[in-house]
Amino acid sequence: MTLRLYCLALLFLGFAHSTRGQALPFSDNFDDGNFAGWTIFDDREPQSGPSNWIIEQGALKQTSNIWAFAPVELETRYHLGTHVSSGNLAWTDYSFNAHVRSTDNDGVGLLFRYNDENNYYRILLMNDPAWSGMDINGTSVNTPLQRIQKFVDGEPTILAENLVDQAYPSGFFSLTADIRGDTIRAYLNEELILTAIDNTYSSGKVGMLSYANVGVYYDDILVSEDRVVYESLEGIPITYPVLEERAPYVQNPTKSSIEIAWRSVEPYRGTVQFGTEKGLLQNSVTEDSSTQKHHVVLESLTPSTRYFYSVSDESDEIYAEESTRTARRDEESQFAFLVLGDSGVGTDTQRKVAGQMETSMNQREVDFMIHVGDVHQGSGDYYDNVYFKPYKNLLKNINAFTSLGNHDVITDNGAVYLDDFYLPTNNPDSTERYYSFRWANSYFICLDTNSDYSPGSSQHAFLLDALNSEERQSAMWTFIYAHHPPFTEYWTNYYGDENVQNHLVPLYESYGVDMVMNGHTHSYERGEKEHVHYLVSGGGGGGLDDFFIDYDHISFSRAVHHFTRIDVDGAQLTVQAIDENGQQVDRFIINKFTDVSVDLLSDKPETFELGPPSPNPVNSTTTIQYHIPQDAHATLDVYDLLGRRVMSLVDRFHYIGSYTATVDVSSFPAGRYLFVLNTNGQRKSQQVTIVK
């Protein structure tokens, strides 16, 4: 008998709404609006909570972020929170099926041969890699997992497990536990994922669990003596409703295309008119069908060109003319972008930072924005109030190249984020979760540090391919951005992400990445380690973190609401952090051809000095040593003999120490120049002769 016919037979027999009968088959679809017959149990030492099991839209839902045990090592050993149970202790061999959906990324699963709250088998699915704990061998893991476990007197044993890229999919999926004799089989969307052999329990009830999950649904429960495995729900989409009008926002500009997206409560066929002259929009693209989620691609455009556009419905212009630009040509070397992270939940602080970003863009041109994650600082379920409204005056003119934060993946593993944004899909998985792009003389790589990036993973292979690509090799600058930082001084008991340190930092260093940009910590921090510059710009609007630990290589850090502006000018980067009131928090310059090393362990210098360059005369690379007797901001510049500054070599905070700057001067015309060191009103200079 097929599953569909079997379920029809159940309906005919009147079992479809029975939660009280103890004979098999047993089913519950919760359409009666209650879950009578199910017993709720919150596990030991609950943190947060209590649980909140409710009926919502004809399904049983648990909405409380409840987990057991405060110490992380215990929390991730047990993965407990709350569960419900029902049925008959005498049930022996059966199939237990449910339709499941998790809008969070934490634990879901089924309990079976359930004797009491401390003695049962279960299937556990965990998508959040940060809380996966130990594997079957007792080794720490940092990846989603699928497990069959038994609990005996409250103590868990792993009977079988998979460490996977994704423990369960977005949207509803079918989950089945089939128990026959001593054999347990687990099915996900009709596919066998785990098998275990154990004879501890021969009979028991059934149940469903929720571990630290703020949105898990269970529906269409069926317990049957026959071997029944629910069919796959894969491919059945969940649509996210359009609740209000959303103004146009620029997406995914390339050298030859620009995408314009917007949303409307009433569906219609939208039209985008565009052209290269203001007020003269001679070209247009109209959507093929009526929709609420509008997305129009303007193609066959010219690189590095400003385009004007307007948006119309089927009768009239509804959004007035704005402008944006295509990506710059590879040979160009001047542009600017903004960096923002952890941008809040629609607070006044977030809007003040957004206002300062608008001011910066209006004062000097900005090409695009980089968002380093937690675009949504809440549950990742609705972006209008927390993103599209606060930044609408930016987004109508420049694209935001966004990255997934841990909050963005809470709802349906980032499905709402992926529904709202149109990003590059140039990775092997053809997803928008991680990608790369070229802009002028710079190459950008976006990573998803919520997903697997360990050696052997698809993302790790993508990163290696990107770093070795011709497009990257021909670029002057390489920027990488993702949510989780490898190092951070703020956020109590958080040292930075250990897996980023282990799996990504060695690649950053060995491949000569210039700058890594992150968020997650709500602060501003920057430093340099093994010639890689690290920038944390996570002060977009969320509550600020407290100082925790001092890293030697982080030269400046502060808990402040801010954004960061980076101006690229050939071989020089100017980096500036601006707070919510428009005040400069920090400013420093990175020169591509200046390498600064420091000796902090030798005798502390007593005087401010600048040594002579060596070699001198020079035709390629020279070194110059300087001594900083007290913590201070110092600059090292090159001037010609007419007193004109021709290059900034160093512009940064210095701890007490002796520094050596290695400078490539091969691009300078022959002649005599001055190296000039300035700090705290003091000035030292040395002459150098460049020969050809």
Image: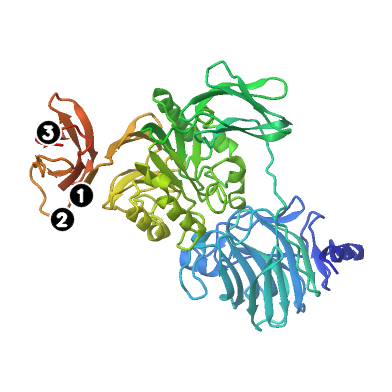
Identify the mark nearer the N-term, 1 or 3: 1
Q: Which residue was labeled with disc 2? A: 601
C-beta proximity under 8 Å, tags 1 and 3: no
Q: Amino acid at mark 2?
A: Leu
In this rendered view, identify the residue nearer to me: 671 or 647: 671
Q: Quadrant of residue 583?
A: top left
Q: Which residue was labeled with disc 1? A: 597
Q: How is the image coloured?
A: rainbow
Residue depicted at x 51% and y 56%: 451
Distance, label 2 to label 3, CA atoms, is 24 Å
Give residue 204's position: percent from left, percent from top: 72, 76
Residue depicted at x 42% and y 25%: 359
Circle 2 — which element? loop
Give residue 299's position: percent from left, percent from top: 58, 32
Q: Which residue was labeled with disc 3? A: 682
Give residue 519's position: percent from left, percent from top: 43, 46
Q: Amino acid at mark 1?
A: Ser
Give residue 477's position: percent from left, percent from top: 35, 42
C-beta proximity under 8 Å, tags 1 and 2: no
For the C terminus, the quadrant is: top left
Circle 3 — which element? strand
Q: Amino acid at mark 3?
A: Gln
In the image, residue 318 sits, relative to residue 50, either above or below, namely above
Circle 1 — which element? strand
Q: Residue furthest front?
A: 692
Q: Quadrant of residue 191?
A: bottom right
Question: Would residue 412 be found to the left or right of residue 265 on screen?
Answer: left
In this rendered view, identify the residue nearer to me: 597 or 100: 597
Residue depicted at x 57% and y 75%: 156
Question: Would residue 178 be found to the left or right of residue 404 on screen?
Answer: right
